[in-house]
Amino acid sequence: MTSKNLQKTILDAIEEGLATLGESPKQAILFHLENTFKLRREEIPKNLTEFKKALEKIFGPGTPYVERLILEKLYSKLNLTPKNEHLDLLNSVEFLRRHFSHLGDV
């Protein structure tokens, strides 16, 4: 899997995870990310730290729940089972990048 493929998969998982909250809330969150946090949709996979900070400001203590929704979609897309249910978004993506790094430029 190339870096570009993984970035697209991450973005798709984020969108699908947010969509589980409803299509209107997903659109509102993406709008808020771009306008308040200056984080464009297509830039999210390369700026996951900023994305997570934005989620924390939007959802507060509910952030881990939203992260889990996204991670469920991400692991499902990669046909993997999470090894540790308590991993957060940043740690999980870092693990996946290392996991797939032997397959190409990730």
Image: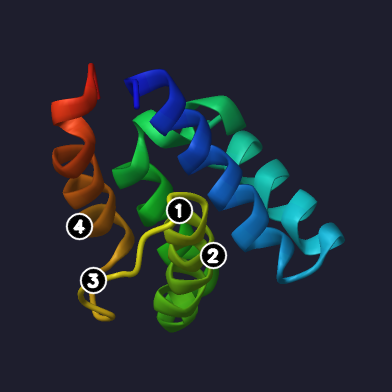
Q: Earlier in the sequence, mark 3 or mark 2?
A: 2
Eye-nearest disc, 3 or 2: 3
Q: Quadrant of residue 90?
A: bottom left
What amino acid type is highlighted by mark number 1?
Answer: Ala
| Residue marked by disc 1 | 54
Image quarter where the C terminus lies is top left
What amino acid type is highlighted by mark number 2?
Answer: Ile
In the depicted view, which residue is nearer to us: 28 or 7?
A: 7
Query: Which residue: 35% across, 43% down?
Result: 48
Q: Residues within 10 Å of mark 3 (few under 14, many from 20)?
A: some
For the residues labelled 4 and 3, the Cα–Cα distance comes to 6 Å
| Marker disc for residue 58 | 2
Mark 2 in CB contact with mark 1 (< 8 angstroms): yes
Query: Which residue: 36% across, 60% down?
Result: 80
Left or right: residue 25 compared with residue 64:
right
| Residue marked by disc 4 | 91
For the residues labelled 3 and 2, the Cα–Cα distance comes to 20 Å
| Residue marked by disc 3 | 87
Judged from the image, the secondary structure of the residue bearing numbered disc 4 is helix
Left or right: residue 103 compared with residue 70:
left
Q: Residues within 10 Å of mark 2 (few under 14, many from 20)?
A: some
